[in-house]
Image: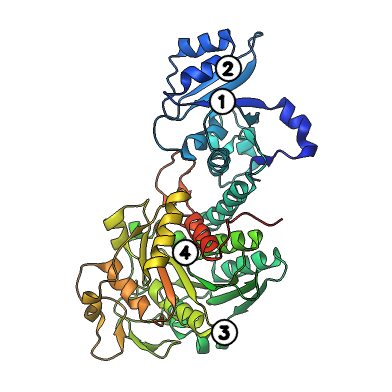
Amino acid sequence: MLDCLPAESDAAGMETSALPLHTARPATLAALRGTLGAAQAAWLDSLGFTGRRGQLALLPDAGGGLAGAVLGLGSEPASPWPFGALPYALPEGSLWRLGAGDHDAADAVLGWGLGAYRFRRFKGPEAERAEDRPAPDRAPARLLAPAGTEPAVASAAAAWRVRDLINTPPNHLGPAELAEAVRALAAEHPGATCRILEGAALAEGFPLIAAVGAGSARAPRVAILEWQGSADGPRIALCGKGVCFDSGGLDIKPSAAMLRMKKDMAGAAVTIGVAGLVMRARLPVRLMLLVGAVENAVSGTAMRPLDVVRSRKGLTVEIGNTDAEGRLVLGDLLALAAERGAEVVLDCATLTGAARVALGPDLPALFCNDEALAETLLTAGRASHDPLWRLPLHSGYDSWLDSAVADVSSVGTRPMAGAITAALFLQRFVPKRVRWAHIDLYAWNDSARPGRPEGGEAQAMRALYAAIAALAGSDGRPDR
């Protein structure tokens, strides 16, 4: 359960009992001290509180109990991250409300909600009873979300859904289960429909996805969700790579490289999160969500290096490396999106290690065939504390994908610019009339930071949602 609680009229008693959380920067600390009593101001001084980012001071009342707290925001630009540590830094189970300070309430609620997340699905009840429990087994402190911060609560809740999907072990989340997650999302939103294709229908309509899944006992699925928030709004398609586990296929990965491959479906998880936000806010768009759910396994039926497969679009693809399977999944999905008349297509995938080498784990790589769309996405990422970084669709490398026996090779012929050549491969499945963006993301926190616990991460979700809201001419706030 998300531990940000809306402060509605029937929660007046909770708001009265909630403790105040004040905030201060070094430049505003003097003003805050003036709003506190002399004793509490002196207490802050005795602690050496300066307002530096992340500094936390608990305030006592006259009887020695807890009267509130002050969080330092530092001199850096406003962000949700200083609030992300609070659910487990404040007393277990305590209830808080935002007090005095120059914080942004939506940032506070978002940071708190993101920081309260822990993946506990496989934790037993003994973890809850144990003494000296680590943070994952403690009850977090709770925050009353002020009126007007409902979009921040929704964003945090969507991130929880995405993180849960990414963190679920692959034996519990295969292609069937990932496709059912799309069906479950559709069931939550009136007017949404979901079709799940498998078997002969998938093999005929999505031959590249079928080839990727040919080596697994768990057959692939394609989930198609459709929803209409406006009869004449822009047609927007979200395409997500849903490789539930990636062994590399016959070009098998080293064992160390497989340790996080349950997250290879993160692109699909992020698009599920974005679609949920779009439908909840009832944005005036015609939305299509396409998820290719598949496992890349090793067996006698697995696709082989140098196989040639005909794609949905009709292009023949030579399999240059079976570990470059994500672009095959997306190729068929992009072709379907174009067939269905999408005007804007946005795809997400944990596609290349080359993007991580170039940009590290925190910056998803953005490739885009339209300058205005690229700027919309970059602006949305900055505004939502979910940054993207653009890399070029450099046409000079396109010939690196030439094949002597097929229309295109799935991998480049040179050991350079791997993220770019992967994007150029995808571009071949997108008609020039379609505005298209491809996001190559990591979707994982290697270590815990405030608001970003170790494990799966909903990277690019807020940026994509804000961009879609901008394309729809909406402020992104829900109508209900």
Alpha carbon of mark 4 to alpha carbon of mark 1: how far?
Answer: 37 Å
Instruction: Give the mark, 2 or 1, whose residue is nearer the N terminus.
Output: 1
Q: Quadrant of the C terminus?
A: bottom right
* Local crowd size for mark 1, using a 10 Å CA cut-off: few (<14), some (14–19), many (≥20): many
Crowding at mark 2 (Cα within 10 Å: few <14, some 14-19, many 20+)? few
Foreground disc of the pair 4, 3: 4
Q: Please name which of the two marks, 3 or 2, marks the residue nearer to the observer.
A: 2
| Residue type, mark 1 in image | His
Asked if residue 111 is positioned above or below residue 47 in the image, the reply reads: below
Q: Is residue 446 left or right of residue 284?
A: left
Using residue 160 as the reference point, say whether residue 382 is left or right of it: left
Q: Secondary structure at mark 3?
A: helix
Tell me the distance, in whole angstroms, between the alpha carbons under discs 4 and 2.
47 Å
Q: Residues within 10 Å of mark 4 (few under 14, many from 20)?
A: many
Q: Is residue 332 left or right of residue 109?
A: left
Please say if the residues under marks 1 and 3 sit with CB atoms less than 8 Å apart. no
Residue located beneath label 1 in the image:
22
Of the two numbered discs 4 and 1 on the same chain, state the one appearing first in sequence: 1
Label pair 2/1, CB-CB below 8 angstroms: yes
Distance from disc 1 to disc 3, alpha carbons, whole Å, reads 57 Å
Q: Any mark on residue 199, and which? A: 3
Give the mark toward the camera: 4 or 2. Answer: 2
Q: Mark 3 or mark 2: which comes first in sequence?
A: 2
Residue on which the image places disc 2: 35
Q: CA distance from mark 3 to mark 2?
A: 67 Å
Q: Which residue is mark 4?
A: 267
